[in-house]
Amino acid sequence: MLHLQLQAHDLVFLIPMALVGLLAMGAIPVAAKALRISCRCAGAILGVLLGVLVLEALPLLI
């Protein structure tokens, strides 16, 4: 099982990644307000997941 060891300084990287995902997915033109909110939520979640993947892969690259 994967055990993540995230410290407080990791939030410096994860929060901007979530915001980038939110903005990128929120820029998709949709007519329904609920779909726009769903796209933004999915983008924030994908941004955080990408940030966790990068944080976990960095020690392997160094």
Image (spheres, rainbow, N blue to C red):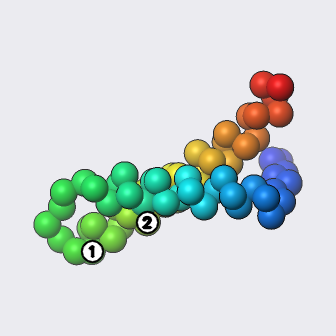
The kind of secondary structure element at disc 2 is: helix
Q: Residue at x 66, y 53 (%)?
A: 13
Q: Residue at x 76, y 34 (%)?
A: 58
Of mark 1 and mark 2, the one earlier in the sequence is 1
Q: Which mark, by number, is residue 34? A: 1
The kind of secondary structure element at disc 1 is: helix
Where is residue 30? Give x, y as percent.
Answer: 18, 61
Q: Residues within 10 Å of mark 2 (few under 14, many from 20)?
A: some
Amino acid at circle 2: Cys
Where is residue 7? Give x, y as percent.
Answer: 83, 60
Where is residue 53? Give x, y as percent.
Answer: 67, 42
Q: Quadrant of residue 60?
A: top right
Q: Is 36 left or right of 9, judged from the image as shown?
A: left
**Can residue 42 be seen?**
no
Q: Quadrant of residue 34?
A: bottom left
Amino acid at circle 1: Ala
Q: Is 9 left or right of 49, judged from the image as shown?
A: right
Q: Residues within 10 Å of mark 1 (few under 14, many from 20)?
A: few
**Can residue 50 be seen?**
yes
Q: Residue at x 83, y 25 (%)?
A: 62
Where is residue 1? Give x, y as percent.
Answer: 83, 48
Q: Which mark, by number, is residue 41? A: 2
Q: Is residue 50 above or below residue 27?
A: above
CA–CA distance between discs 1 and 2? 11 Å
Please identify the residue farthest to the left as the structure is shown. Answer: 31
